[in-house]
Structures are given as C-alpha cells and as structure tokens.
Amino acid sequence: MDVGVLLQVVLAGLSTGAVLGLVGLGFSLVAGTSRVLPFAHGDVVVAAVFTGVLVVLGRTPVAQDLAGPESVAFIGLVLLAGAALSGLVALVVVRPYRDRPLGWVAGGVAAGLLMRAVLGLALPGQAYAVPDPLHLDALSSDALLHLPGGTTLPVRTLGVLVLGLVVGIAAEELLVRGRFGRSLRAVADDPDAATLCGIDPGRVLLLAFLAAGVLAGLAGLLDAPSHAVSVDDGVVLGLEGIAAAVLGGLGSLRGALLGGLALGVAQQVAVHAGGAALQDVVPLGVLVLLLALRPQGLRRRQRQSR
Amino acid sequence: MSAVDVAQVLYLLLAALGLSLAVSWAGLPVLGGGAFLAVGAYGTALLGPGGEHWPLGLAVLASVGLGAAVGFVVAVGASRLDGPPLALATWALAWLVQRLLLAYPGTFGGADGLTRPAPAHLVTRTFGLDLELSPAVHVGIALVCCGLVVLALLRAARGPGGLDLAALREGPEIAATLGVPVARRRRAVLALAGGVIAFAGAGNALLLGLVVPSDVSPLVSLQLFVAVLLGGTARWWGPVLGVAVLTALPPVADALARAADVDVERSRGVLTAVLLLAVVVLRGPVGRRFSRPGPAPGLAAAAPDAGSGIPGRTVLAVEDVHVTYDGVVALAGAHIDLRAGEVHALVGPNGSGKTTLLKQLARHPQAVRTPQHTVVMPHLAADRQVAVGARGGARSRHAVLRHLLATPSSRIPDSRVPDALAATGLGHVVGADPQRLTSGDQRLLQVARAVATGAPALLLDEPAAGMTGDERARLRAVLRHLAHRGTAVLLVEHDMRLVGEVADRVTVLHQGRVLACGTPDQVRSDPAVRRAYLGTLGA
C-alpha cells in the first residue's frame, strides 16, 4: 500500500476512533461506577446534537455556516442536552431499578427507542447535514490536509482526532484523580462501604450519568458534522462505543479511549479493503465476539475477586 | 382476518414462546429475537427452492439447526456473563444481523429482501407426497407447534426440567454450588429457543414467499421481548397475552399516525417504547399480586443415599494447600481431612484462611458448600429450593427428557426433599414464601438445600451467623443428626462455645497454616492456640 493511502486510512481511523473512544469513555464511566450498562448512551449522543439543531436551526435545517454567537449557543445547547438527557435516563429508568437488572436494561433500551422515535417525529428526513460550530474546516485554506502521494484528507479529521484525544485525556484526569474521582472509585469498589463513608451512591450514579452525558454531547459535536446524520444512528454509534469500552476493559477510561482508537483503525482498514458495507459490521462483530469470548477485554490486568 | 394473517400471528406466537423459554423461564434477557428469526427466514429462502434448491424440509431443518447453533454459541459466552452483558450481546447481535443483511444486497436482496414462489410445496419422492403449503396448512402447522411447545413447557415445569429452569432463573450462582450444571443448562435453553424462533421465522418466510430485513429488525426483537415480559415470569400464557397485545399494536399505531399525521414507523416505535417502559414499571406490583409459590414437584430416580457413609472413613482430604490473592498469602501449606460421621470445626481469627480453605475443599465433587451470607432465592417456595439441591445432586441421565416422555422410571417418587427437610428440622416450611421465614430458618434452609444434594461432605460457612441462642441450639441438633447419619460436616465457626458443644475435632488456622488439630479440649489447652487466638479471650 502507498504511504499516502496508508496514512489516509490510519488517520481517518484514529479520528473515528477518538469519537468512539469518547462515546465508550462515557459508557465505561457509568458501567465502572455502578455496574449499570447505559443502553441509551448512543442515543443520547445523537439526540443531544439534534436538540441543538432543532433549537438553533429549526425543523428544516439546511447546511449553513453558524456565526460566532450561534456557534457558542449550539455548543452550549448540545452539551446541556447531553447532560440533561443522560441525567433523565438515570433518574427515570435506572435509579428506581438499581437492584433489578431487567428493569434498567429494558428501561434503557426503551429510553433510547423513545428518543429516536420522538426525534423522528420532529425530523422526518432520512439524514441531515449538521453544521460544525467548532469550524474545524478553517484549519487549512481549502479544508483539506495534503498527504504525501497526492492523497488528501478533510482537515477536520485531524482536528477531531486532536480534540477528541485532548478531551478524553482531560476527562480521565478529572474523573479518575481528584475528589469526584475518588468517590467514583469508592462507589465502584463497594457501594455499601462508600455509603458508610458518607458518599451517596445514588448521587454519584447521577453525577456519572451527567458527566457521561457531557462527554456524549462532545462526541456528537465532533462527529456529526463529518457526515450526514440520521436520528436512528444513535444505537449503532452507541454499540460501537461500547465495543471500544469492552475492548479496553469495561470500567477503565483510558482503556475505552485506546479501544476506540484501535477499533477506528480496524474499521477504516476493513472499509478500505472490503468496501463501505463493512463500516458497521466490523465494530458490531467485534462487540458480539468480545462479549462471547473475552468479556473482560483485551488488556491483561484483572483484579481477582475475593 | 384472513388465513394469512392468522398464520402470521401464530408464527409470531411461536417465536414468542421460544423466546419466553430463555427470558421468562430461564431468566436470560435475550434482546436479539429478531436475529434468530432472520437465521430461520433467510436460511430457508437461501437454501430452499428459489435459492440453492435444497428440498424444502431439509432447508427448514438446516435453518432451524443454524438458529440453535447461534443460540448455543451465544450461550457459550453467556455461561460467564450475568444478565445485563447477555442482553447487550444479543442486542448487538440483532443490529449486527440487520447491518449484515443490508451490507450484502447481492446475497440478501438489500432492503427489498428476497422473494420466493408461494405457496411453497413440500415434496417427498419417497412417500410420493406433494403438500401445498397453503395459508390454511400454515395455520395448522403453527397451531400444532405452539400447542406442542406449551404442552412441553407445562409438563416440564412440573418435573426436573422445571427445577432446572427455576434454578437458572432464581439463583444460578447458588444452584451451581448445589451441583446444577448451570452453563450446560443455559446452552440447552438458548439452543432450544434459537431453534424454535428460527422455525417460526422459516414458517413466516414460506407463508409470505418474502423475507425482508424489516420483518427481522431490532424493533421486532424488542417487540418480541415486550411480548414475553408482559406475561410475567414462567407462565405459559404470558406470550399469548403478549402477542395479543402486539397484534393490536400496529392498527393502533397506524390510526395514531394518521390522526397526528406522522410517519407510521415512528408511531410504532413510540408505542413499543411506551409499552416496554410500562411493562418495566408495572412488572413488580402486578407480578406480586399473582405470585404463587407452588409445591415441590416429584423428582425422577433417587440418587444413592449419601447418608450411609462408614463412620470414621475419610471422605475428603487436602494437604499442603497454597493460595495467594494478588500477592497476599491466604493459605501456606494448610491441610485438613473430613471423616464420615464427624463434625469437624474449622476455627481461626479473621483472615486466617478459613473461607479460602473451604473453597478449595468445595472443588471436590464429593462436597457441597453453603455460602457465608444468607442467599435466598426469593421467588421460589422453600421446599422447591430444597428440591433444586436434590436435583443438583441427582446425576441421572436425561431426567428432563424421560420426565417429558413420562417413562416408567420417571414416576418413582423421590424422598430426598422431605428427608432433607426433616433432617434439618424444617418440616414446617413446605410451600412457604422464603422471604417470610425467620432468619434462623433461612440459614437452616441453606443447609437443607445442601443436604438434599446427598453429598457425603457438607461445608458450612458460619451457619450460625446471626442466629439467636434458641436457633443455635436447633442448629447444634441438626449438625449432630447429620453426623449421626454418616455425613462428614465441616463447620467454619467463631463461636467457641458452639464448637465445643458440637465438634468432634477442631482444626485451628492461623496465617494460612494449621496451628493445631484435635478434640475441642485438646485444642483449647494447646499453648500455641491460646497465644494466637484464645489467649486474648481468656485474658
């Protein structure tokens, strides 16, 4: 393979991977804290983006450039919507059923379906072009990145990769170290003991969902402008993020980010070799196989239970 | 309603019945019913007439086998997964299959699917048979299949099969300690469910002469799941009720869509989601109204009575055991031997390695252990929990099948449940709701479950924890009685008075090593023991 093409495939893969990593990071955060798997997480990503679209651009959005204030409003709205939707899921379908997995599994799936269906009522089109409030295209004059061998890549690919990694690493710093991180780990380790230390597991669960929601909004902001988005894309995006999280070992934030990068590259290599049809098949296949064969993830470290 | 409509509803019911075996009987949350439908429908269309031109019966059989194989493979993973990850895996499977169908239009026909000549003909040259599969014939086939599944479920539920399913559903971990082969049962259940659902998919494909991805979509998977959940836990009529509701859903959704001028698919989605949420919310309160702990079923073929061990014979012995957790040494060369007819107490300070040694012993097939904490299977009547133990200990071959076919050997009544209840002084709990038992009775129920397995060695981890003085006296009598029957009892205990009263021999563990072993009096007067353990009490 030509160096330019190789670079193109790998960079595109890392860029998608950074987004998947962010989605997986939110999932892993919740799963690691509470052992609850947020089934609606992917739908939160897409629903957050479309909430911003609906409010800023209206029901018949056209691809248009956002002015400065609009961009800021759009970003704020999407992050807020992500946190709000995720928090709502936590309060309505997760918290009442913490000890009854069937309840939060079915509730999470139903919440995702409801988000898709309600958004679909407001936005009946097949797919929408979402504007980029971060204006990543402006990184180069022709919005392209010129690689050796005459190949090109949209310059926002690189922007997404860098921003995604920065956000992911910052999130890990913030969520693993520091006071909140300590209470997260305490609850994850032993909810009863954490309660005795004055930590309210219900509150920590809600906070984890809220943080995951903000991360979901960020992932949506980075990903959505790259391609046409349908309101139904959330489930599969969510499952791909979950694949990243499981790949890196569920509960590990760094693992989710690394898993996302690996998965993104694998996906782009498969698409390059076998056609666009494989785009979703590869990550979904990886998830099914992983859960069946190696649910603890690819990384070795695994604490032995008592 | 035309015959085609009726047959379609019946095939949906058959799929729901198949799924209910996994979801509501075995407690496995399978969200990917549509994937199994797809295997059956596309398998038949691709292999049978119009595809590879295999004979129709063979094509259907192959598709059903493939569905069962997919179920089996999912279960191989599920044997290590608890509910939620299994739900996740099957949900991902539903989407993977959908994306695969759309990714290869050359094979699967894309969104338009595959068309096949209808009505199909079932031709066997050997018998000179040419049966036209008209909608009326499909109604007959589907009806017979649904009836067979319901009858089999009803019959199995009253025998060893019902106990296996209850064990899978109510407490797979505890059932595994009692000797129920949980992983194997899960594989069997999921393979069976996969096969039944695939058959329903194949039937529907032949009925319509058409397979499209939207008929086997993740939304359909969810609707099937809702249909199964609607009827609650382990009731044969659950899927019937669920499918009735599902059948009413499209007309209602369409009417709503017309009234509100929105997309039909969206309104179906909203209704499915609302229904699923409603089921989740109402499940608890409604389920409690109809819960009924039934009597224990008779069991097939009594196992050899384990109570008849020769007193004094060594049943179980381990030597020089070393165990390390993450660099922390739990056992450093410990040894113990359990003899028939003897209560052997294992004592030592916290962290001395008692539970670790007990777990090592529990690996032995001769031994059954009870957990330190009370583990109740909350929705299973007390005597049925004991029956789960009896079932776990009975290694009779094909018991489920023999009971299903009502072979003569399956009619021998089994005495192990009343026997275990009597031996533990729990005769009064037959049919009782386990959650309403006193904590002492719940502790004894754990012992009774283990006794019912008929294991020659019982490993009891602090059975007296949380017991009152009277309950301790009862436990003491039970332990002496079990030893008298010839069982080897290992008792992990902190209460030295109880140990002194009930134990024949005592092993003292300290920092992963055996400090002393002997009669209670010998041990009590051992200077090393006094220093390490008892001395602090006597001071």
Image (spheres, coloured by chain):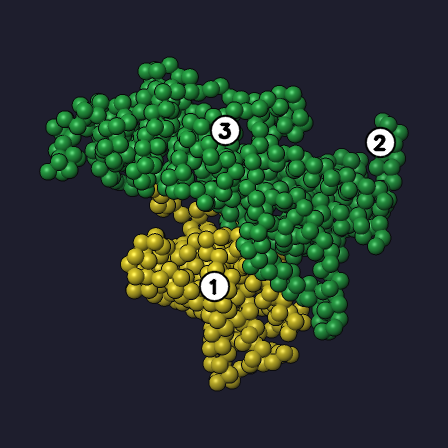
Chain colours: A yellow, B green
State the image coordinates of residue B106 (x, y, percent, origin top left).
72, 51
Amino acid carrying label 2: it is Thr
The quadrant the C terminus of chain B occupies is top left
Amino acid carrying label 1: it is Ala
The quadrant the N terminus of chain B occupies is bottom right
What chain does mark 1 sit on? Answer: A
State the image coordinates of residue A87 (x, y, percent, origin top left).
47, 67
Snapshot quadrant of residue B58: top right
Label 3: which residue?
A: B417
Alpha carbon separation for disc pair 2 and 1: 58 Å
State the image coordinates of residue B413 (x, y, percent, origin top left).
57, 24
Kindly identify the residue that appears in the image at 72 percent across and 49 percent down. B12
Is A115 displayed left or right of B108 in the figure?
Answer: left
Label disc, if present, on residue B124 of the rendered structure: 2
Q: Nearer the viewer, residue B301 or B144?
A: B301
State the image coordinates of residue B347 (x, y, percent, origin top left).
25, 32
Alpha carbon separation for disc pair 3 and 2: 51 Å
